[in-house]
Structures are given as C-alpha cells and as structure tokens.
C-alpha cells in the first residue's frame, strides 16, 4: 500500500489558472495544510517550496487529477525535479449526490483516494520525441476531419448543381472530382448561380488539396520520429505510422506499464470473465480502458486478418475450435497488445528528452 512507502500525499486539483494543493498524512489521512498557487512556472516553484516546508523530499508523493490536461504543466515540472507523481483518475471516484464540492475538497479527496489504491498510474511523459509525436498526431487528426468535411461539402454541391455540371461531375471519383473542380475558372457567360457554384467548388477543392499536403507532411514527420523512438514497431505486420504513434503515446515510457497485462488492461484488451450457470469458460470484450489504444489494436487485427496468412490461419483454427469471430478478434487484440508492449518496453529506446 502507498501508506507504507511515503509519509505524506499531496493531492492536486488543477484548473486553467490555479493549482490547489492539500497535504495529507499517509498514516492517518489527516489534513496537514492546503494552499493555492498560480498555474505557471513561478507557481509550480512556490508549490514545491511550500511542500518542502511541510514534508520531506523522497518521503512524499503528488497525486494529480488531470495530469494530461490542466495538471500537465505541474506534472512536467515535478517530473523534471525527480518528484514522485501519480496520475489520479477522478472518473473512478463515485461521488454521492449531495457531496460537497470545492477545489480544496477535491485536492483532499485525490490524496485520500490514492492511499486506498493498489494500482497507481504513472503520468505520461510530456517531453522530447513523444511530445512532438503527440502534437503531430493531434494536428493530423484535425486535418483529416477538416478534409472529410470539405469533401462532403463538395459532394453536396454536386448534388444540387445544375444539370450539365452535375452530369459532368457525379460519376467522378473523389480524387478526380477534386482535380476537376480545382481547375474551374470564372466566366461571364454563366449565370450568377453557376458562377458562384463553380468558384465555391474550386475553393473547396483547393482546401482539400492543401489539407492533403498538410497530412502528408505530418505523416513524414511522424514516421521520422517513430524511426527514432520505436523503429521495430514499424516492421510489424499491420502496424502503420498512425497506429504505431497511438501505441507509443499510450505506452509513453519504460516502466509506466510494468507488465504486458497492465498494458492490455490499459488498452481494454484484457479479457473479462463472463461465466454463469451452464455457460463456462467464456469471456467478453472489455469496454473500459484507453479507447484510442483499443481502436488501434482493432485496426491492426483487421489488417492482419486481411493481409497476413498466419493470422488468417489462426482465425480458421480458432473458429474450428468453436470460438466466435468476436472472441477470436479479442484474442488477437490481446496478442498484439502483448507484442507491442514487449517491443516498446525491451528495445531500449533513446531517452525522451528535449
């Protein structure tokens, strides 16, 4: 238990502008002191100095709610100072209907909650190659969504265009449609509606082309980063740069998931027993965990079923044993999670430092 390892727990409830901290005595869960600091570099330094005045470095742990969002700055500062930091998942706490609510009470609750937990979450790192990979992943996802919206708008205009223009464009592929609309020019011979429609289509086509170039830039940058951080991951069947980036971001660093079972549990790929009555030795899909990571495992499993002969043979063998397709996919996701964890944890990647 955590109370056997430290003397004090410092609970943190961060928001956009402030960080509220509460020091709890590990043995008695008694509140020692609480304070509030600004959410910036000076405030973080003041928080550490304040903690030094009430606790002993090395004999304390920081429990931060939202370590990947509002608490990210403090988490990074504490990690660089070699402080022990635990990521507190507030969603797991079941608040009562009439429970009191304040930043100080939330900080106290965070400290007391982690004292009763056997599994302690280490926050993800926010430096170096991993942070650059996260930024590219977020930007790429936004560009993909914007491209999809622009293509949908372009196709909607085709549906409502005049008969001649609709007949010209309706059977084109998306790529051909973008190329054709990108070449439209204004002409005084057309009506105002025809002119506006064609120019709008051209603008949307140019937007799609620009987003395609942006996505390609992110793809190249992500591949370069992955070759530095996890080169062996890209050699695995069914794993591309997008799914590989998802795996690296969830794994974060050596020691965060101490076992392959912990990584599978993080991904929601650990089987859950579903045995009852005469139904024995059954398991169901896990709906919890990191859903982006779970989706990445699912994509890799489907890709292997389509392209990898060994995986297709495995599917056939397990179906012959009486497994359903969903159960086989679950087994594949668990195997892929095990394989990914071993590649990341034991490849001795370079230190993720700025």
Image (cartoon, grey):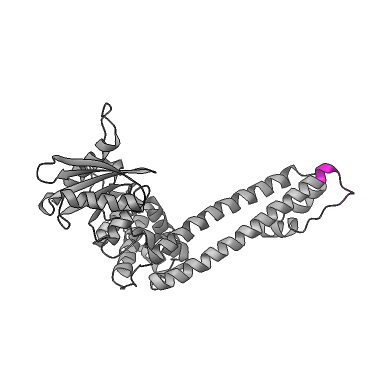
Query: Residue 193 colored magenta?
Result: yes
Residue 13 screen position, x and y as percent: 30, 43
Residue beneath the point at 22% across and 56% down: 84
State the extent of the magenta-drawn residues as a range.
Answer: 186-194
Residue displayed at 25% across by 52% down = 48
The residue positioned farthest toward the top in the image shown: 98
Residue 99 in the image: x percent, y percent?
A: 26, 29
Check the image and report above or below for 172 versus 105: below
Residue 334 part of the magenta-drawn span: no
Q: Quadrant of the C terminus?
A: bottom left
Asked if residue 83 lies left or right of residue 165, the reply is: left
Q: Nearer the viewer, residue 321 or 39?
A: 39
User: Residue 183 in the image: x percent, y percent?
Assistant: 77, 59
Residue extending farthest right: 189
Q: How many marks?
A: 0
- Identify which residue is drawn at 18% across, 50% down: 53
Does the image show residue 326? yes
Question: In terms of secondary structure, what is the magenta stretch mainly?
Answer: loop
| Viewer can see residue 170 | no
Corner quadrant of residue 92: top left
- Residue 103 in percent (x, y) is at 29, 37
The quarter holding residue 252 reads bottom left
Relative to 205, 287 lies left or right:
left
Observer-nearest of 277 and 94? 94
Closest to the observer, 17 or 116: 17
């Amino acid at each position: 238990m955590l109370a056997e390892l430290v003397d004090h727990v410092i609970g943190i409830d961060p928001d956009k502008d402030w960080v509220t901290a509460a020091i709890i005595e590990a043995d008695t869960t008694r509140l020692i002191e609480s304070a509030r600091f600004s959410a910036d570099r000076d405030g973080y330094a003041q928080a550490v100095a304040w903690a030094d005045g009430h606790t002993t470095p090395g004999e304390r742990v920081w429990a931060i709610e939202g370590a990947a969002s509002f608490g990210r700055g403090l988490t990074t500062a504490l990690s660089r100072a070699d402080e022990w930091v635990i990521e507190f998942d507030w969603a797991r706490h079941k608040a009562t209907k009439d429970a009191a609510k304040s930043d100080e009470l939330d900080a106290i609750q965070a400290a007391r909650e982690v004292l009763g937990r056997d599994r302690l979450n280490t926050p993800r790192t926010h430096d170096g190659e991993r942070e650059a990979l996260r930024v590219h992943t977020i930007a790429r996802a936004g560009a993909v969504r914007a491209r999809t919206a622009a293509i949908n708008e372009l196709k909607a205009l085709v549906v409502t265009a005049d008969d001649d223009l609709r007949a010209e464009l309706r059977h084109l592929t998306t790529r051909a449609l973008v190329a054709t609309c990108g070449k439209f020019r204004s002409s005084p011979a057309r009506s105002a509606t025809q002119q506006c429609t064609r120019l709008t289509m051209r603008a949307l086509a140019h937007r799609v082309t620009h987003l395609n170039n942006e996505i390609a830039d992110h793809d190249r940058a992500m591949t370069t980063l992955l070759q530095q951080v996890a080169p062996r991951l890209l050699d695995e069947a069914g794993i591309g740069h997008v799914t590989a980036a998802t795996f690296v971001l969830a794994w974060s660093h050596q020691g965060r998931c101490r076992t392959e079972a912990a990584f599978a549990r993080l991904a929601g790929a650990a089987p859950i027993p579903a045995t009852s009555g005469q139904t024995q030795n059954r398991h169901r899909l896990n709906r919890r965990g990191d859903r982006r990571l779970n989706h990445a495992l699912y994509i890799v499993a489907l890709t292997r079923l389509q392209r990898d002969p060994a995986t297709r043979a495995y599917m056939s063998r397990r179906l012959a044993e009486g497994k359903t397709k969903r159960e086989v996919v679950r087994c594949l996701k668990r195997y892929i999670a095990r394989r990914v964890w071993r590649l990341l944890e034991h490849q001795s990647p370079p230190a993720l430092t700025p």
